[in-house]
Image (tube, rainbow, N blue to C red):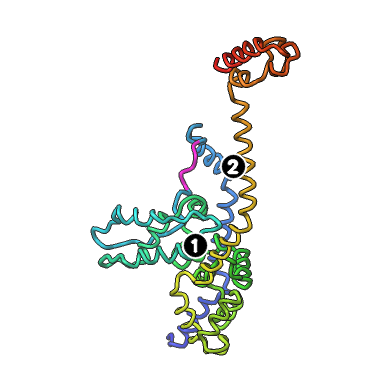
Amino acid sequence: MQTRSSSRIVSNQSSNPTSSTNLNPKGRNHRRSKQRIENLNLDDLSSRVVMMADQRTMAQLLQAPTEGYEDAIVVPEITADNFELKHGLLTLVQNKQFFGHDKEDLHAHVRYFNKITSTLKFPNVPNTPIKLMLFPFSLEGAARIWLEKEPPRSIFTWDDLVSKFINQFFPPSKTTNLRNEITNLQQRFDESFSEACDRFKDLLRAYPHHSFSKLHQLDTFYNALSSKDQDSLNSAAGGNFLDKMPRECLAIIKSKSKVRYSRNKSIISKVSTNASTSDVSPDVAELKDMVKALLLDKKSQNQSPALVKAVEESCVTCGGAHSYRNCLATDDNNYCDNIQEFVSQTSAVN
């Protein structure tokens, strides 16, 4: 009789991997796969690939590839119905394009572009896809070529686009030049206070990452002014201008900048004009005399030869270059004197 324990023993013995009747399936599969690889002819496979490539004609092989024409900017899909950009909007963007010149302000271009696109409101359409879609139309010249050379599908966000745009057209060397120009600012001789203030603001606006504090800006601008405008600020401050609080200094500068033309400029211009007139007037008078003499000399040279010949004295008796009155051949001869006088008068009339 077979018990449960004996049945377990029998089953365990049959499942023993060391039994002679048990075969290794993994080893058998490994030998079969190795045999298949040995039987595989690689030459036949390569010949099939070559034959497939040879199916194309010479014209097809020499044809330019059609890949790689994707835009650098990846515009997110817009799911809104009936969405389209109007032609007038494209014209508005193209009216103020950025060309990539050295004197162009790319920060002003980005601010202007943001201002335009911020006014666009489409239902169920985010603002970012619109900006990514419109920005290429705001570029021309070297700036447009730069964007076309960017790798396809390499720009996915607006921040990424602005970062690459600024790094391309606002290199570190330009940052250094603007920083030095701000630090070494000096008011020009013929520049009014308001004009100097506007020029200083333009430099700060062109270099928004200047990191100059308000105190540094006020100190730089004050020391860049002429002594007359510095005295004017001190007078408006009731003492030393730099002893005031920064907000008070800004208020004084703003109040003084409202006068678009400084009195200092008009006085300088007036004094310069008067001084130049008094200093140059003798030279001008001498020059006028020289011109007048040249004109008279030219006029005398252009006179007709007959008129010049008519006023020349010539003796009609002997043909000498003297008056008939001084001719020795006509001495003590009144008749000849009358004849000579008549002939002389006739010649002068003719």
Give the structural element (helix, strand or loop) at label 2: helix
Determine the residue positioned at 61% across, 28% down.
Answer: 300
- The overriding secondary structure of the stretch rendered in magenta is loop
Q: Is residue 65 magenta?
A: yes
Residue at mark 1: 106
Q: In the image, what residue type sits under mark 2?
A: Asp
> In the picture, residue 259 is in which quadrant?
bottom left
Give coordinates of residue 165: x percent, y percent. 51, 61
Q: CA distance from mark 1 to mark 2?
A: 60 Å
Q: Nearer the viewer, residue 78 or 184?
A: 184
Give coordinates of residue 162: x percent, y percent. 48, 65
Residue at mark 2: 43
Crowding near the residue tagged with mark 1, few <14, some 14–19, many ≥20 C-alpha atoms within 10 Å: many
299 up-or-down from 3: above or below: above
Q: Earlier in the sequence, mark 1 or mark 2?
A: 2
78 up-or-down from 187: above or below: above
Q: Is residue 199 visible from the viewing direction of this image?
A: no
Q: Where does the magenta region start and end?
A: 63-67
Give coordinates of residue 350: x percent, y percent. 55, 14
Q: Nearer the viewer, residue 312 or 134?
A: 312
